Image: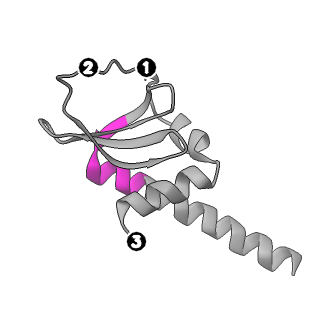
């Protein structure tokens, strides 16, 4: 599954705030004509972007508030880790109640 699809899965799970609140510094991100942010994925106002000049990846919400920024690899690892945890909980709950 691509990083873009993983990001969309995270947003649609409605758990993105939980995921991002763990170790992020929230701050407003100003954008301008000279910014070098390329959107890799977008869903429901959330954007996964990469800076084409320095390779830093960020997640911003619909209010352009940066929720987290790191390397693309780290963001992908965080998303994969979170999705695995969610899937483990779903499997556990299925076993518990079935």
Q: Which residues are magenta?
A: 69-78
84 left or right, relative to 47: right
Q: Residue at x 70, y 74 (%)?
A: 91
Where in the figure is residue 94, as x and y percent of width and height? 78, 76
Viewport quadrant of the C terminus:
bottom right
Q: Main secondary structure of the magenta part?
A: helix
Residue marked by disc 1: 27
Q: Work out whether residue 61 or residue 98 is closer to the camera in this orientation and state it.
A: 61
- As for residue 75 lying within the magenta part, the answer is yes
Q: Earlier in the sequence, mark 2 or mark 3?
A: 3
11 left or right, relative to 77: right
User: Residue lying farthest left?
Assistant: 53
Instruction: Report the Cα–Cα distance between label 2 and label 3.
Output: 32 Å
Residues tagged 1 and 2 counted as in contact (Cβ below 8 A): no
Q: Work out whether residue 79 or residue 2 is closer to the camera in this orientation and state it.
A: 2
Local crowd at mark 2 within 10 Å, few (<14), some, or many (≥20)?
Answer: few
Q: Which mark is residue 1?
A: 3
Where in the figure is residue 27, as x and y percent of width and height? 43, 19
Residue 4 sits in quarter: bottom left
Q: Is residue 93 above or below residue 67?
A: below
Residue marked by disc 2: 32
Where in the figure is residue 45, as x and y percent of width and height? 51, 39
Instruction: Report the Cα–Cα distance between label 1 and label 2.
Output: 16 Å
Q: Is residue 82 visible?
A: no
1 left or right, relative to 56: right
Judge depth for marks 2 and 3 and give the one in front.
Answer: 2
Q: Residue at x 59, y 39 (%)?
A: 17
Local crowd at mark 1 within 10 Å, few (<14), some, or many (≥20)?
Answer: few
Q: Work out whether residue 32 or residue 3 is closer to the camera in this orientation and state it.
A: 32
- As for residue 47 lying within the magenta part, the answer is no
Local crowd at mark 3 within 10 Å, few (<14), some, or many (≥20)?
Answer: few
Q: Is residue 74 above or below residue 80?
A: above
């Amino acid at each position: 599954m691509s990083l873009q699809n993983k990001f969309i899965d995270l947003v649609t799970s409605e758990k993105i705030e939980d995921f991002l609140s763990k170790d992020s510094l929230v701050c407003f991100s100003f954008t301008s004509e000279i910014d070098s942010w390329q959107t890799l994925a977008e869903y429901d106002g959330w954007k996964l972007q990469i800076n084409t000049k320095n390779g830093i990846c960020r997640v911003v919400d619909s209010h352009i508030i940066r929720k987290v920024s790191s390397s693309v690899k780290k963001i992908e690892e965080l998303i994969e880790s979170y999705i695995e945890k969610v899937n483990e909980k779903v499997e556990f709950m299925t076993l518990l109640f079935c």
